[in-house]
Structures are given as structure tokens and as C-alpha cells.
């Protein structure tokens, strides 16, 4: 692993440093590292646990969030790598409750799940072509979701979470790379290119009752860099799932 600096996308997109009275602040986190992330093996909805590095990343996330304004609740994908990340954070933040939501799961990648990304074109060309297709309605053979299906379930989930919490509250969501990139797309109607989502990165959304979303900050891994901890630079979800 190589030491990672804060990516260029780790920037504030709003100057506000406090939670406003007309939106819920949702801190969206990617789970900590797994052995499959390190191998560039596609996880999708296969249930892969954190490795030791991922557990340390989760602890560092928890330490950071424990020093920030109060968090009301933690929501998490029910997949082990996300749920364990959420539980570690909850313990570091005074025993917060963790609520699982299956709609926060990673994209189901069908027959590609379990394969190393660089081998997919050779081992399963049909599924590979479906995956790289520009058609957002294209499903992946083997029960895999289309990008449209992923967008529908994960954006609906985040809006539901925002609607459950009164304006001014802060909640945490622990999810996965493809989900978080899709949420970024939803909050960025200008068509900005999809940005990288690093393991254990912090991405802050403001969700309004009327369906409007804004992004306060993106890709913040300063809690890892300040410790001198080695942070793997995994890149896009297409390669790590």
C-alpha cells in the first residue's frame, strides 16, 4: 500500500460549518478496507468482512466523528463490511444505535461477483460487456442490477432517511462505492464526472424535504492522513465493487 494524500475532490462545496435549520445533514461513509478491495476483486453483494486495515480505518472514522457535533443515529448496509464499520463507529461515539437498510447494499454485479476485475472480459465477456455498457437500463447476467435499478433504490433510501430526521439533525450512513457514486450523481445535476470513493472516506450531503440535495464536502480522508496511516488508493467501484 502507498500513502494516500487527500484527493483533489476532497473539498468543501458549501462554506457552512454548522447544520442548518432546513435540511438534515447526512454523513455518508464508505466501509473500511477488505481483502477483496486490496485484490481488486469484485464484491458486489457477496458478504466480505473487513480486514485488519479496514477495522483500523473504521476506528479512525469513529474517533473523528466522536469529536464532531452530535450524531443522532447510524444507518448501514446490512453487508458485513459496512455493518462492522458502522458498529465500530457507534462504539467510538458513545454507543449509538445502528439501523440496517438493505437498500444501502452495494450494487448486485451478477456473474462478475467474485472475479478480479482485470479478468472479467476474458472469463465472462457477456457480463463484462453488460457492465461497461453505456445503457443505464442494462442489467448484468446472473441477477445483476442495472444502473437505473441501483439509482432508484439507493436514492430513495437516502431521501427516506433525510425525511425521517428533523431539520438540523446529523445522521451517518455507511454504504458502498457504487451506491455513494450514484448518490453523488443524483446531487450533481450539472453532469459532473463521477468522482472516486475511497474506503473510509467522508462525504457530507444536505437533504431537504422537497427532494433537493447538495453536497457540503467530498472524499475527506484527513482522519487517516493525519495519523500517518497507510491508506489504499482503490479507485472506482468498477474495480473493487
Image (cartoon, helix red, strand yellow):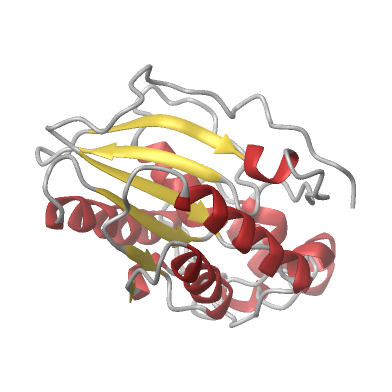
Residue 45 image offset from top left, x and y in percent: 54, 76
Q: Which of 146 and 37 is in front in this view?
A: 37
Q: Residue at x 52, y 70 (%)?
A: 82
Residue 66 shown left or right of residue 26 in the figure:
right
Q: Nearer the viewer, residue 199 or 238?
A: 199
Q: Residue at x 75, y 51 (%)?
A: 234
Q: Which residue is drawn at 39% across and 29% down?
A: 216
Residue 53 image offset from top left, x and y in percent: 76, 65
Residue 186 image offset from top left, x and y in percent: 35, 39
Residue 135 visible, this orientation: no
Residue 163 image offset from top left, x and y in percent: 13, 52
Residue 3 visible, this orientation: yes
Q: In this view, does 13 lie above or below 175?
A: above
Q: Residue at x 28, y 36 (%)?
A: 206
Residue 232 shown left or right of residue 177 in the figure:
right
Quadrant showing the C terminus: bottom right
Tell me where residue 25 sits by quadrant. top left
Amino acid at each position: 500500500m502507498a500513502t494516500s494524500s487527500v484527493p483533489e475532490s476532497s473539498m468543501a462545496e458549501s462554506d457552512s460549518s454548522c447544520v442548518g435549520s432546513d435540511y438534515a445533514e447526512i454523513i455518508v461513509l464508505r466501509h473500511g478496507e477488505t481483502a477483496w478491495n486490496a485484490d481488486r476483486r469484485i464484491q458486489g453483494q457477496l458478504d466480505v468482512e473487513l480486514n485488519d486495515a479496514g477495522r483500523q480505518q473504521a476506528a479512525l472514522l469513529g474517533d473523528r466523528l466522536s469529536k464532531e457535533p452530535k450524531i443522532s443515529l447510524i444507518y448501514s448496509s446490512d453487508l458485513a463490511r459496512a455493518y462492522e464499520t458502522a458498529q465500530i463507529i457507534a462504539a467510538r461515539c458513545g454507543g449509538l444505535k445502528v439501523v440496517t437498510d438493505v437498500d444501502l447494499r452495494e450494487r448486485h454485479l451478477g456473474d462478475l461477483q467474485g472475479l478480479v476485475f482485470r479478468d472479467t472480459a476474458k472469463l465472462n465477456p457477456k457480463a463484462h460487456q453488460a457492465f461497461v455498457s453505456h445503457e443505464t437500463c442494462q442489467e448484468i447476467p446472473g441477477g445483476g442490477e442495472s444502473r437505473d435499478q441501483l439509482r432508484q433504490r439507493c436514492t430513495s433510501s437516502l431521501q427516506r432517511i433525510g425525511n425521517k430526521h428533523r431539520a438540523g439533525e446529523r445522521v451517518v450512513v455507511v454504504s458502498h462505492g457504487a451506491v455513494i457514486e450514484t448518490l453523488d450523481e443524483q446531487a450533481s445535476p450539472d453532469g459532473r464526472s463521477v468522482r472516486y470513493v475511497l474506503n473510509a472516506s467522508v462525504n457530507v450531503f444536505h437533504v431537504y424535504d422537497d427532494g433537493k440535495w447538495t453536497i457540503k464536502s467530498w472524499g475527506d480522508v484527513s482522519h487517516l492522513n493525519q495519523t500517518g496511516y497507510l491508506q489504499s488508493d482503490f479507485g472506482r467501484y468498477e474495480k473493487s465493487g
